[in-house]
Amino acid sequence: MVEAKKVSNSLITTTYQFDSIVLKASMGSSGESSSGANDSVSATAFEVDYKLDKSTTFYSYFAQIKNAANAKGTFAAADNFPAVVTAGNDPRAFGLGIRYNF
């Protein structure tokens, strides 16, 4: 029988709105899977939304994952997305967009 590894995780998110602007922030971390594994991961994300009207919002975001030397945390759009990174790399994502609600 294989013993399950226990990991400590934490996540903090916040949102602040004033007028037509919404600021969002998230920070999270996951500890090592075992003592000395050096596979902990932390992530930070920021987003700014500007509501143009009732249906249209412009937005921009930045997110970064910080991997310890043996960690392979990455961004993925779906379960079958083959986004594999080299252990220890720190992937980043930046985006601009327009959201329209029908």
Image: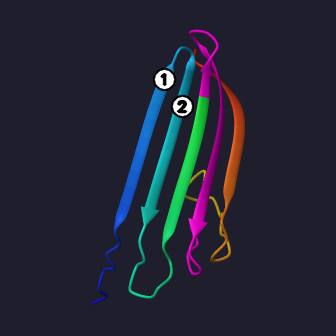
Q: Specify the principal SS of the magenta part.
A: strand
Q: Is mark 2 on a helix, strand or loop?
A: strand
Is residue 36 placed above or below 6 in the rendered structure?
below
Tag of residue 17: 1
| Gap between marks 2 and 1 measured at Cα | 6 Å
Please report the residue visible at 68 percent of the width from the left and 50 percent of the height from the top. 93
Tag of residue 74: none
Query: In the image, what residue type sits under mark 2?
Result: Leu
Q: Nearer the viewer, residue 64 or 76?
A: 64
Please report the residue visible at 65 percent of the width from the left and 69 percent of the height from the top. 84
In the image, taking residue 90 as reference, residue 15 lies left or right, namely: left
Q: Residue 3, position in %: x, y?
A: 29, 86
Q: Which of marks 2 and 1 is nearer the N terminus?
A: 1
Please report the residue visible at 59 percent of the width from the left and 60 percent of the height from the top. 65
Tag of residue 23: 2
Q: Residue 102, position in %: x, y?
A: 58, 14
Which stretch appears magenta? 49-73
